[in-house]
Image (spheres, helix red, strand yellow):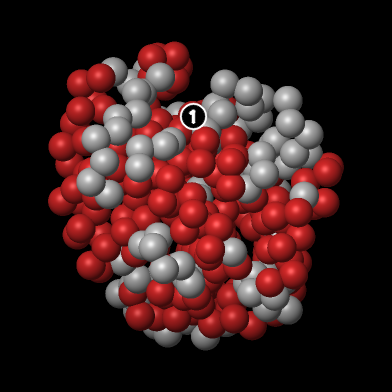
Amino acid sequence: MNWYVFGGEGMSEHKIIGMIKDSGLLPHIPQEFGEILNMLLEPIEYDIDSCVDRFSRFPQLEKILIKVLNYNFDLSREIRTIKDAINYLGAKNAKIILISYVTRLLLPDAKGRTRIFDNKRYWKHCLGTSIAAYMIAEETGLSDKDKMFTYGLIHDIGVTVLDICLPDYLDRIHEMQLKGMHQIAAEKIVLSGITHAEIGMWICKEWKLPDEMLSVVGYHHYPMVVDRFIDEVRVIHLADSISTNYYERLLGNNSSFIYTDKIMKALNIDKKYVDYIIEKLPIAINDLNKRLVL
């Protein structure tokens, strides 16, 4: 197995990672962000005063949480402090908004610089993955559906990092994909053996994001080799596969990706339910794309 696969210790020395770092265009996430997320992923154990203290070091997050509450919820009073916000939201919803903040830094209208690759079209694939993941999680009860929705939004952050930092490389990959080559195969050729999944895992480590997010981002194309957060990775893998077929149609390709029977069986999902998701996806994506505000 390639030394760099799955974000091994040598990953930071890979020439593509070096080029991403040298570009100076990578969004910055303060260390406190990862600490807060790790804390909120274990809501039974977290100490709210300690959490508030970490929020205070990152004023942007405090403003986001308070703004989301005051503008998007019908409240009997105005939320003024971060402690009020967390108490009102609960750890689960606060965590989801924080994950959405990562996504907001990497939205298609942020800093994409490709000429051929259409990041807004690819964003629809991410939305499709989110919707499919939500539906699978709701149907199976194997993982929190709201969490899986947000994981769907960020599962391909490696692609967006390439769009921001190395647009010419992503354009070359996309040109090969338009000719019918599988995305992963094209990435390994252009990126000297690594893929967007490994780049995504590296950025999760750089930003000190929780291990659960790192596993989803890094292993969603390799669900049979993961040994932690298995259900979450499998849900995103199947959701990503369903949405990839939708995305290939947007590109005008006839390529079809087969849903692994082993993964479907592990999730207790049958082909009938997959077909149901496929039927609902195009309208749901277009609707969400029009009204989504992170």
User: Which quadrant is the N terminus positioned in?
Assistant: top right
Q: Residue at x 46, y 67 (%)?
A: 114
Q: Residue at x 64, y 70 (%)?
A: 26
Q: 193 or 65: which is nearer to us?
A: 193
Q: 208 or 146: which is nearer to us?
A: 208
Residue marked by disc 1? 234
- Residue at disc 1, secondary structure: helix
User: Which quadrant is the C terminus positioned in?
Assistant: bottom left
Q: Is residue 17 above or below residue 129?
A: below
Q: Residue at x 70, y 35 (%)?
A: 5
Q: 246 or 28: which is nearer to us?
A: 246
The spot of residue 20 in percent (x, y) is 68, 63
Q: Is residue 112 left or right of residue 206?
A: left
Q: Is residue 55 left or right of residue 158?
A: right
The spot of residue 267 in percent (x, y) is 42, 21
Q: 90 or 276: which is nearer to us?
A: 276
Q: Quadrant of residue 18?
A: bottom right
Q: Inspect the image, locate mark 1, and give the three-letter code of the amino acid beneath it.
A: Arg
Q: Residue at x 71, y 63 (%)?
A: 19
Q: Quadrant of residue 133?
A: top left
Q: Is residue 136 above or below residue 192?
A: above
Q: Is residue 131 left or right of residue 87?
A: left
Asked whether residue 263 appears in the rendered view, the answer is yes
The spot of residue 208 in percent (x, y) is 73, 57
Q: Is residue 71 above or below residue 11?
A: below
